[in-house]
Amino acid sequence: MAGGIGSRFWPLSTADRPKQFIDILGIGKTLLQLTFERFNRIIPAENVYVVTSEKYKDLVMEQLPLLSESQVLLEPLRRNTAPCIAYATYKILSVCPTAKMVVSPSDHLILKEDLFLNEIEKGLQFAGEKEVLVTLGIQPSRPETGYGYIQVNEKMDYNLYDNLFKVKTFTEKPDREMAQVFVDTGEFFWNSGIFVWSALAIQKAFEKYLPDLNTIFENGKKLINTADECHFINKTYSECPNISIDYGVMEKADNVYVLTADFGWSDLGTWGSLYENHPLDKAGNAVSGSKVFLYETEGCIINLPEAKISVIQGLKDYIIVESGKVLLICKKDDEQQIRQFVADVMLSEEKKI
């Protein structure tokens, strides 16, 4: 899934080039490329599909040259994750009715890839033998308020797996007090948003829990993988509800299981999460930019163009980012206001026009 706009990483991430298409870690590869390479270790390139906005088609083809155009599914409108997954499901079913699927965001960080892929393969085996919906739950390391949580029920007796549980509840982002309770109980795991199932199992779940959405794709399934596919998607996507797979299916289904693990996961959803996964200097600064001179500055996130000579003195716990014609300087603790900053800037620019 590569259709998000990454507004919380503004101004580095923009609507024209969101964070999944950016080398946000400063390692020479974008998050999309890292995600593809990770899965390509166990899944052949010809079996990979990218669902994204039609405006990002060229970016996907440029960054993933091993894919053909037919593997890039273009959404004319943003309709959240349930329609996105439904489109991919019907696309895959038209090619291979017995296929098993892994659904993953394109902009997450996985530090322990071997452990991660081992869990994916365990999930694929389970989903290949049972009609189940599997998600990956992350062992929480802190009372994080920015993630959803999965509460586990009894451990499942399956193939000697010691980390497979029936899901009891899904909970949206809690406040800090409730998040601390979740961590203290030991029954809750972060919801990674990564899923494993058979294409048939998720299609049946759509049919049962999101029948209107399923009907849209069921009525047009004969057009999938034909010359009329694009026209069908463009015509009917506006009829799709704007709903997440978690709310639309996972929270309602009774055949949901979770594989719990700790494989160095972060959704890289905020500048703060990037800071936690970025090398730090002696003063605790995460710096991207080779001509940055710091004096009495600590705990800052600094992302500046390579050619920009910058001198920063006397700041603590700030975000300092320059991209194009935009410079952002704000407190790390106030980064939740970035979306409002973006809205204010866009309104100001519209008034000028």
Image (cartoon, rainbow, N blue to C red):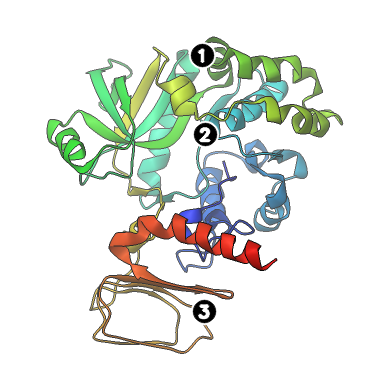
User: Residue placed farthest to the front in the image?
Assistant: 351
Q: Nearer the viewer, residue 47 or 326?
A: 326
Q: Which residue is mark 3?
A: 305
Q: Residues within 10 Å of mark 3 (few under 14, many from 20)?
A: some
The answer to whether marks 1 and 3 mark residues whose Cβ atoms lie closer than 8 Å is no
Q: Residue furthest left?
A: 184
The residue lying at 71 percent from left, 50 percent from top is 55
Residues at marks 1 and 3, CA–CA distance in whole angstroms: 48 Å
At x 51% / y 53%, what residue is drawn?
Answer: 6
Marks 3 & 2, CB-CB < 8 Å contact? no
Q: Secondary structure at mark 3?
A: loop
> Where residue 34 sits in the image (x, y, percent)?
51, 54
Of the 4 image quadrants, the one containing the N terminus is top right
Earlier in the chain: of badge 3 and badge 2, it is 2
Q: Earlier in the sequence, mark 1 or mark 2?
A: 2
Q: Please give left or right for residue 170 compared with residue 61 in the image.
A: left
Numbered tag placed on residue 209 in the rendering: 1
Up-down relation of residue 221 to residue 281 (above or below): above
Amino acid type, mark 2: Val
Residue that appears at 36% across and 60% down: 335
Q: Amino acid at mark 1?
A: Tyr
Q: Residues within 10 Å of mark 1 (few under 14, many from 20)?
A: some
